[in-house]
Image (cartoon, rainbow, N blue to C red):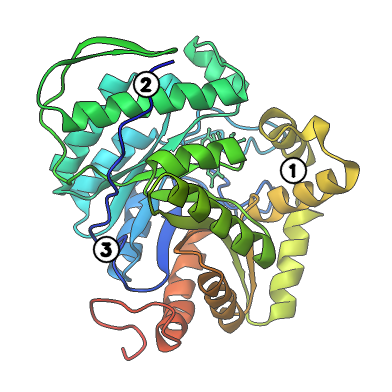
Amino acid sequence: MPEAPFSVPRNNSGPLFADTGLKLGLFGINVTSAGGVTAFPDRHEIGWEQNLRLVRLAEDAGFEAVIPYSRWRGFEGRTNPWGSSFEPYTWAAALAARTSRITVFTTSHCLTVPPVMAAKQIATIDAVSQGRVGLNVVAGWFEKELRMFGVETLDHDARYGYSEEWLDIVLRLWGEPEDFDYHGRWLTMNGGYSSPKPVQAPHPPLMNAAFSPRGHQLAARYADIAFVATTDLTATGKKVRQIQELAAGHGRELSVWVTGSVVCADTDGEARRLAERYATVDADEDAVRNALDWTMGGAHLAPDQRAELKRSVAATMGGYPLIGSSSTIAAQLADLAAAGVDGVALTWMNYETGLPRFIAEVLPALELAGVRRPLGPSLATA
Ligand SMILES: Cc1cc2nc3c(=O)[nH]c(=O)nc-3n(C[C@H](O)[C@H](O)[C@H](O)COP(=O)(O)O)c2cc1C
């Protein structure tokens, strides 16, 4: 085993970490059916001009971040959700060139990208964006796609050991002016070197998306943001506290973000009926089963847990359910903020209709309630 990692300095600069209340991210727009595994006719399809339009809309409304999925194949079934996707590094680079304020994340599977390549690509996007790139690191969990890379997929905890070494190397490539050698359990590097260094100091913000305690240990040691998925408020508050305690154990602080899936309608009842439709009549049952079995260890779940997860994956892709009228959704977001959540990365079944409505109706309510305190012009008074 390599020595314990050097202490990773926190990147607490910039709008992602400013004292402005609940942060918002636009999540998953680079993959098809990002909002849920359903055959609902109005589900998300991808196109570059459409992605750019959505990001600019979010940026103009004050969203702090846009975060892609890293996905290489879909879950098949009749709609093959996530089957079509834009590659997250090149996508982030293009967005960096066409935006001016929003933090553009890339999402990287550690196993599929050599750390030298990742460090350089991020430094390049940081130069293009003038210091607005972020890196969301995922250990990966979908063997069928990882096998396409011809890499040894490793078991769950070994993937995290590998990812930590990967991060050690990336951080040293960004931070160290001199060549260095690295000899880990999984990764070896002789004469490591990278230039230019990123614009952001001490480094671009690091996010880690994971469900498990092992994943949260990695986040506690390395990440500026732990990105988690929860489906109820009590569990969310508990998870935030657990992760922050883990980080405090390493003498660090970090933000916690959750995924939130918006299903908005004129009334709460109408929104609930829509979510119910996604989860039942429209659900792509085969694709839901594949998503569960291929990534979430579905075969080992108790029947009631499996049924619950099936509904959640079909209707909201496992994200925190933000289901209701605009005012109900604003109240649900306020609850998440009160539970200690620092940011919510949002998905919709259809972003092109959902995002403008959210900006027009939910954002002003959040600002009026003081849940978000924008640095720029307020939507609440517009
Ligand atoms: C919010 C969130 C977003 C994720 N995004 C991705 C992704 O884009 N691509 C991917 O392969 N895995 C993604 N994952 C899964 C991670 O790869 C993670 O390694 C997987 O959940 C298995 O590890 P775990 O048991 O620690 O969760 C995501 C997980 C969460 C919680």
**Camera-side mark, 2 or 3:** 2
Indicate which disc, 1 or 2, sits on the residue closer to the N terminus: 2
Question: Among all residues in the image, which is located at the extreme bottom?
Answer: 381
As displayed, is residue 164 above or below residue 304?
above
* Quadrant position of residue 86: top left
Is mark 3 in CB contact (under 8 Å) with mark 1?
Answer: no
Are the residues tagged 1 and 2 within 8 Å (C-beta)? no
- Expressed as whole percent of the image width and height from the top left, the position of residue 54 reads 37, 58
Local SS, label 2: loop
At label 3, the amino acid type is Pro
Mark 3 Cα-neighbour bin, 10 Å: few <14, some 14–19, many ≥20? some
Please state which amino acid type lies under the numbered disc 2. Answer: Glu
Residue picked out by circle 3 = 15
Q: Position of residue 191 (x, y in %)?
A: 18, 10
Percent across and percent down for residue 98 are 21, 51
Contact between marks 2 and 3 (CB within 8 A): the answer is no
Mark 3 lies on a secondary structure that is loop
Q: Is 10 above or below relative to 148? A: below
Q: Which residue is mark 1?
A: 284
Q: Quick check: which quadrant has ligand 1?
A: top right
* CA neighbours of label 2 inside 10 A, class few (<14), some (14 to 19), many (20+): few
Q: Nearer the viewer, mark 1 or mark 2?
A: 2
